Image: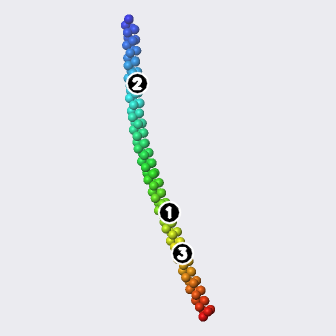
Amino acid sequence: MDTDSVAVLRLDIAGLRNDVNGIRQDIGVLEGKADSLEAWRIRYLAQEDQVIGKLFNKVDELVMGLSDMRADIARIRGERDAERRMSVAIISLLSAACGGLIASLLHG
């Protein structure tokens, strides 16, 4: 082989080495980006779990509040029913007393 062919071959090999080094650098950059993306994904999943947990806690609080409200409404209805029954009983007693008084005055 002549020296010109060897020189061209050496230049080609040097160019290939530069290309390989460039590819290695690109692979390093891509691996860094992949690691960064994986770290972001892990943080996102953790935050998603926290948000879902907070959401379920708020829903549980809301359900408990509604349950307490329902119990209060039932208690108030019970008190109203008791007041109505007491009013009816008092009116009945007053009616009976008035009826007895009128009857005694008329028969008197």
- Check disc 2 and report its element: helix, strand or loop: helix
Identify the amino acid type marked 1: Arg
Which numbered disc flags the more N-terminal residue, 1 or 2? 2
Residue 79, percent across and down?
A: 50, 71
Based on the displayed image, in which of its 4 quarters is residue 4 positioned? top left
Report the front residue among 50 and 97.
97
Residue 12, percent across and down?
A: 40, 15
At horizontal 42% and vertical 36% (from top left) the residue drawn is 37
Residue 2, percent across and down?
A: 38, 5
Residue 100, percent across and down?
A: 58, 87
98 relative to 10 in the view: left or right: right
Vertical placement of 96 versus 26: above or below? below
- Check disc 3 and report its element: helix, strand or loop: helix
Alpha-carbon distance for marks 1 and 3? 22 Å
Identify the amino acid type marked 2: Ile
At horizontal 50% and vertical 63% (from top left) the residue drawn is 70
Based on the displayed image, in which of its 4 quarters is residue 20 positioned? top left
3 relative to 92 in the view: left or right: left
Q: Identify the disc placed on residue 70.
A: 1
Identify the amino acid type marked 3: Arg
The outermost residue toward the right is 106
Which residue is identified by label 2?
A: 23
Which residue is identified by label 3?
A: 85
At horizontal 61% and vertical 92% (from top left) the residue drawn is 107
Number of numbered markers: 3
Check disc 1: other Cα within 10 Å, few if <14, some if 14-19, many if 20+.
Answer: few
Check disc 2: other Cα within 10 Å, few if <14, some if 14-19, many if 20+.
Answer: few
